[in-house]
Structures are given as C-alpha cells and as structure tokens.
C-alpha cells in the first residue's frame, strides 16, 4: 500500500523539479568583476558568456554614477566574448546592462554593477 | 518486495499567461494528462486517465534594493493542480475463500489537490548579477533548494480519506550549459506519506540547447525568450 502511495509523490517531484533550469547564453563572468571594486575607471567592460554570440543583435550599455552613458556605442563580439570601450566617467557605481542573441537563436538580458574608486 | 516498470505516460500542455521581467515574476497555466494503461500495473499505474489543470508561478527576488542584494538570488516557485480521475470508482468482484460467497470491493478514486512550492538560491545568479566572489567554478553552478510536494484528497474521498500526504525535499541542483543534475532527500510529512527518508536524483538534458535546430526546435512559433537569463523554476 505504501508503494502505491509513494509513486505519485515521486511523479509529482519529477514534474516540479524538471524545469529548474534552461541554458542559453548566460553571463559567465565579467571584467571588471560583477559587484567588485576597481581603483580607477576601466577603459572597457568585457563580458564572457556561456555560448557564442551573434554580433548583430548583442548590446551593452554602461552608465556611471551620474546616470550618464559612458560606453562608446557598438560592442565588439568575438565568439562568446563581448566588450565595449568606455569614456572616463569618474568614481562611484557603474551600471552595466547587456542583451545578447546566442547562436542557438535565444535572446537573454541582464545587468550588474561595479564600483570605481578607492 | 520491490517492483519494476514504467509509470503511466504523462503529458503537459503549458502556456505562459503573464510575465513581468522587471519583477522577475511569471505565471503559467497547464493541463497534464496521465494516460491510463500506458504504464505497468505492478508499480501501481492506473488503467484510467487522470486530468490535472494546474497553475504555476515563479518569483525571483532580483528586484530587491541594493541593501538586500544578497537575497536577490532567492527565487520562489509554486504550483497548484486539481487532479480529476477519468473514473470515479473501480469495483472488483471476488470470492471469499472462507465462505465461498461472492464479494464486491469498491475503491473510490478521489479528486486530489496537488500543491507544492520551492525556495532556492541561485549561485549562478549571485555570480553574474550580484557579486562575483571568485568561488570555485563548481560552486558557481549550484542551486541549493527545498521543495515541498503535497497531495490533499478533496472530493470522492469515501475510501481514500482526506489526509494530506507529501514530502519536504531539501537538495541541490548543479546547472550546466546542456544539462543539469539534481539530488534531493525525500522527507515524509507524516506516517501516511511514508516512514523512511528517501533520495531522488535526476539528470535533465536541455534538448533545445543540445540540438536547437533538430529535436529541440519549438513545435509552435519561434524561439522563446526566457523571462530572466538565469536558471529558474
């Protein structure tokens, strides 16, 4: 009797657990590192993703502590890396917003911050 | 004594009815059908269909303010379904071995509320959206979680009773690019749910990433944009 009781429990668990993740082009790491502090304003932001990217539909915007855009515009894409040059933007919290299209045709987006200053 | 065999085949049609990427919230509805007679009787597979309309939701805490940034990788998911058996009861005729009289045994198949929830902490989200702590790569792919899966008979309960059964399942999932592996303990919530702690493991391949233009290609429409770029329920 106990066996027949546990079977639907296990079935339900499988149903609940199976969609725990889907993998597309997610941010693996960044330079400057996510949430970390650098002493001086970086000359570029570089992102590494978990899949190769399509350059035509992948973007990065970077704003400084004052909310002004400090990226120079079109990012450079090479394989699973994407980078964009920065203009000097002073100290404080920088916000990075990214949106990418991976070669498996899925788009993803995200954002993070890093700190500039002593 | 053990038993081996497949349970009934189960299919689910699921449709996302609402998503709010800014607040990392998504809600879906679905209809699951357990196809009666497709599994083995020896493992308790029912000979009749069961239909379960279900509501699903997921909420990530990524919209919390900077002062609570360490809680942003938390996500909560839940589901509530109402399982409707295609047969209300099963009558079995037999012979009493002592008296030789004919016996009639009727089992009522209850309508059951299937409900559950998870709370999880995404290390991939922590690294890519909150702070990169420089942890080992293996750690950065982990999602510790606790699941609860519960069943409450709510109608046609003459022979089943109305006691809620289920398990609380602490565990961890390792999330990769093309697969994930999860392992959880199964802790019964009461004696009716079981008397021992069990373990369940699962290996899940992402067919849409392994073969996006073949078997992983969407049946309807184009590629799907996830509400969040991070692994979530």
Image (cartoon, rainbow, N blue to C red):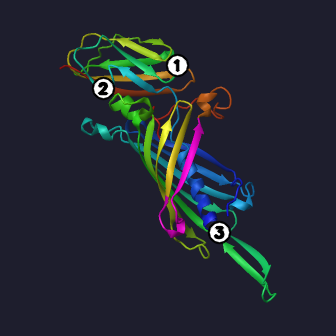
Looking at the rendered structure, which numbered label has been put on residue A113? 2
The image shows residue B143, relative to residue B169, as above or below, that is above
- Residue reaching furthest to the left: A118
| Residue B202 included in the magenta stretch of the image | yes
Q: Is residue B91 above or below residue A77?
A: below
Q: Earlier in the sequence, mark 1 or mark 2?
A: 1
B139 is within the stretch colored magenta: no
Q: Name the residue under label 1.
A: A52
Would you name the residue on which mark 3 appears?
B109
Q: Residue furthest bottom?
A: B99
Point out the stretch of residues depicted in magenta: B187-205
Callouts 1 and 3 close, C-beta under 8 Å: no
- At which x and y percent is residue B217? 64, 30
Using residue B130 as the reference point, say whether residue A100 is left or right of it: right
Q: Are marks 1 and 2 on the same chain?
A: yes
Q: What element carries label 2?
A: strand
Mark 1 or 3: in front is 1
User: x and y percent of residue A9 in the render?
Assistant: 57, 58
Answer whether residue B45 is visible to the viewer in this image: no
Residue at point 42%, 33% (across, down): B140
* SS for callout 1: loop
**Helix, strand, or loop for circle 3?**
loop
Chain of the residue displaying label 1: A
Front in this rendered view, residue B5 or A108: B5
Is residue A11 visible in the rendered structure shown here? yes
Q: Indicate the position of residue B174 as horizontal and vertical percent values.
A: 49, 38
């Amino acid at each position: 009797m106990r066996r027949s009781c546990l079977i639907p429990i296990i079935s339900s668990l499988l149903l609940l657990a199976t969609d725990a993740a889907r993998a597309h082009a997610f941010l693996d790491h960044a330079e400057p590192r996510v949430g970390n502090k650098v002493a001086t304003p970086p000359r570029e932001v570089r992102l590494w993703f978990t899949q190769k990217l399509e350059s035509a539909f992948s973007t990065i915007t970077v704003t400084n502590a004052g909310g002004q855009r400090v990226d120079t515009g079109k990012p450079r894409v090479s394989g699973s890396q994407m980078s964009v040059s920065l203009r000097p933007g002073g100290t404080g919290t920088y916000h990075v917003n990214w949106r990418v299209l991976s070669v498996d045709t899925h788009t993803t987006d995200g954002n993070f911050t890093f700190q500039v200053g002593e | 004594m053990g038993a081996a065999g497949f349970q009934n085949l189960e299919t689910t049609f699921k449709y996302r009815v609402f998503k709010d990427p800014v607040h990392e919230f998504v809600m879906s509805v679905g209809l699951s059908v357990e196809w009666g007679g497709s599994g083995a009787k020896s493992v308790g597979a029912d000979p009749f269909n069961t239909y379960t309309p279900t509501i699903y939701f997921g909420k990530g805490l990524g919209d919390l303010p900077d002062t609570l940034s360490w809680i942003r990788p938390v996500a909560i998911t839940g589901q509530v379904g109402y399982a409707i058996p295609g047969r209300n009861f099963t009558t079995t005729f037999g012979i009493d071995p002592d008296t030789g009289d004919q016996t009639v045994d009727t089992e009522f198949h209850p309508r059951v509320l299937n409900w559950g929830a998870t709370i999880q902490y995404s290390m991939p989200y922590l690294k890519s959206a909150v702070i990169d702590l420089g942890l080992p790569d293996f750690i950065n792919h982990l999602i510790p979680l606790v699941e609860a899966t519960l069943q409450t008979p709510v109608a046609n309960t003459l022979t089943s009773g109305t006691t809620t059964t289920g398990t609380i399942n602490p565990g961890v999932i390792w999330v990769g690019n093309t697969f994930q592996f999860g392992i959880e303990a199964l802790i019964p919530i009461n004696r009716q749910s079981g008397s021992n702690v069990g373990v369940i493991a699962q290996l899940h391949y992402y067919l849409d990433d392994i073969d996006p233009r073949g078997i992983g290609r969407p049946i309807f429409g184009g590629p799907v944009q996830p509400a969040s770029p991070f692994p979530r329920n």
